[in-house]
Amino acid sequence: MKKALLTLGVMSIVIPPLLFAQPNREAQDTDNAVKRAAKWTSPHVVYQEFRGPVSQIDKNMKIFMDEFFKQGLVPTNRTSPPMGIFHETPKSADDPIRYDVGFTIQAKKRVRPPLKIRAITLDRAARYTHTGRYETLFDVHKNLDRSIAKAKLKASHPVIHLYLDNPDKVGVEKRRTEVLVPVGR
């Protein structure tokens, strides 16, 4: 095992290799996410369509949630996370794209505009849980794209983000987002 020696004035410290030569753990994890790709289904998703930069998703999530609850709808269960459904890949947080925000509900119900309802099935999806700032999801997608290409697969849309933690209650560095990317040959 290689060790580094750091000398500070008259004091020397031995630094274990894990502190200065960590492998890219996220890249390894995205490789595993692609290897474990499996079917994912959400039978009743109530959603609202938006077009704009993903940097506005917080504002649009609030617009959707206000309408969702105004229509008397209830998520599948108390822990059912809100989701982002991305039909295009943004190049940056300010790149305008088409996306939806929604919730899964228990059974099909009639909804009024601007809300819609549909089933979403991803025949084969790489599934990766990211912990950290939402802004760093671009890096997650780059790693997933690399892992998908390495497995000789192709990514498609829609890409799903399940926002597992309430941003009002969980600090930005501890927020978990489950990312689902459809893959195929």
Image: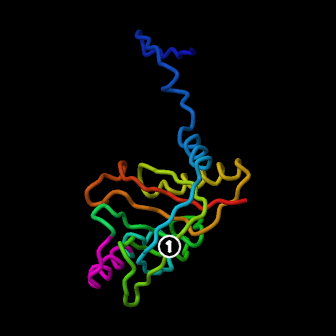
Foreground: 77 or 85? 77
Q: Residue furthest bottom?
A: 113
At x 47%, y 75%, the residue is 100
Residue 41, compared with residue 98, is above or below; it is above
Residue 67 in the image: state x and y as whole percent: 32, 83
Is residue 5 depicted above or below 137 in this figure? above
Q: Position of residue 54 (x, y in %)?
A: 48, 69
- Please identify the quadrant where the C terminus is shown: bottom right
Q: Nearer the viewer, residue 19 or 25?
A: 25
- 82 relative position to 21: left or right: left
The image quadrant of residue 11 is top left
Task: Tell me, yes or no, whether the highlighted magenta stretch contains residue 6.
Answer: no
Within-10-Å neighbours for mark 1: few <14, some 14–19, many 20+:
some
Q: Position of residue 113 (x, y in %)?
A: 40, 90
Element type at mark 1: strand
* Amino acid type indicated by mark 1: Pro
| Apparent side of residue 32 relative to residue 85 in the rendered image (left or right) | right
Residue denoted by label 1: 53
At a point 65% along the width and 48% down the height, the residue shown is 147
In-front residue for pair 52/88: 88
On whether residue 69 falls in the magenta region, the answer is yes
Magenta span: helix, strand or loop, mainly? helix
Numbered disc total: 1
Magenta span of residues: 61-75
Name of the residue lying farthest toward the front:
107
Considering every residue shown, the one lying at the far top of the view is 10
Asked whether, in this view, residue 92 is left or right of residue 133, the answer is right
Q: Quadrant of the N terminus?
A: top right
Instruction: Please state which of residues 96 and 110 is positioned toward the viewer in this rendering.
Output: 110
Question: Residue 14: x percent and y percent?
Answer: 46, 14
Figure coloring:
rainbow
> Which residue is at a point 47% across and 18% down the rendered structure image?
15
